[in-house]
Image (spheres, rainbow, N blue to C red):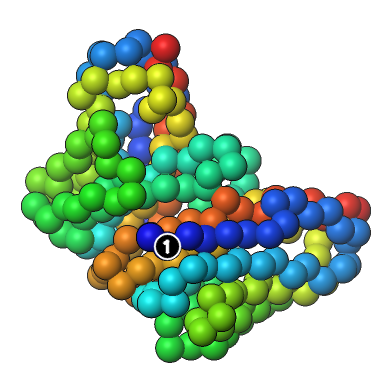
Amino acid sequence: EAQVTQNPRYLITVTGKKLTVTCSQNMNHEYMSWYRQDPGLGLRQIYYSMNVEVTDKGDVPEGYKVSRKEKRNFPLILESPSPNQTSLYFCASSYGTGGIHLHFGNGTRLTVT
Amino acid sequence: KQEVTQIPAALSVPEGENLVLNCSFTDSAIYNLQWFRQDPGKGLTSLLLIQSSQREQTSGRLNASLDKSSGRSTLYIAASQPGDSATYLCAVRRNDYKLSFGAGTTVTVRA
């Protein structure tokens, strides 16, 4: 089954404790991206990658890191999480760089206390 | 920076009524525009994608139009059903490959 898998689904952590949210897709997609969703603000793009070893900042990259060492994986790293990073995070992937429908994971709800 | 606005934020209609959802964007230099559906606790499901050179796309009861010059897109859902209850989001892919989303319109279809 074609899918984008995020783990974990729920995560509660404390300020400053490094964490990684994993994202994996099985569709051989070139494009992968991360978003955060906050009430009233919609989804905002954090980082995106157009292929292996190619990443670029979205609109809200501060406090986040990503890597794309393999085509199927695109982990999101929070080196020192803060309470303002409490949010619902989504990973997505698509063929090419923009012409094909995005496929989304089911989300990771992160709480930073 | 691209700003995407969806009005209204919420909408409640009786079953069978046609739905009209609006999306406006500030920068007409777009690559494409997509409409998504989001169910509670779930990710987003792509409904329709309109390339910048197209005026509309149709899929079943759904029809989306795009007017780049005025910075507007409209999603029409014909003969609404309770199963159409969800949040609908539009997203604009800019020419720099970044994606900007609206905050969404939450639709409730009453049986």
Does residue A70 appear in the picture of this structure?
Answer: yes
Residue at x 44%, y 71% (from the top left corner): B27
Where does the image place residue B14, in percent across and percent down from the top left? Answer: 90, 59
The answer to whether B5 appears left or right of A111 in the picture is: right
Tell me: residue B80, above or below residue A12. Answer: below
Where does the image place residue A40, in percent across and percent down from the top left? Answer: 59, 42
Tell me: residue A90, above or below residue B37. Answer: above
Residue at x 26%, y 60% (from the top left corner): A31
Question: Label 1 is placed on what type of residue?
Answer: Gln
Please rate how many residues cluster around mark 1, counting C-alpha atoms within 10 Å: few if below 14, some from 14 to 19, many from 20: some
Does residue B88 appear in the picture of this structure?
Answer: no
- The residue that label 1 is drawn on is B2
The answer to whether B104 appears left or right of A82 in the picture is: right
The answer to whether A50 appears left or right of A87 in the picture is: left
Residue at x 72%, y 57% (from the top left corner): B8
Where does the image place residue B38, in percent across and percent down from the top left? Answer: 58, 50
Question: In what element is the residue under mark 1?
Answer: loop
The answer to whether B12 appears left or right of B7 in the picture is: right
Chain for numbered disc 1: B
* Number of marks present in the image shown: 1
The foreground one among B97 and A51 is: B97
The foreground one among A69 and B94 is: B94
* Quarter assignment of residue B73: bottom right
Tell me: residue A14, above or below residue B81. Answer: above
Residue at x 33%, y 43% (from the top left corner): A60
Where does the image place residue A28, in percent across and percent down from the top left? Answer: 23, 60
The foreground one among B38 and A38 is: A38
Q: Looking at the figure, which quarter contains the N terminus of chain B?
A: bottom left
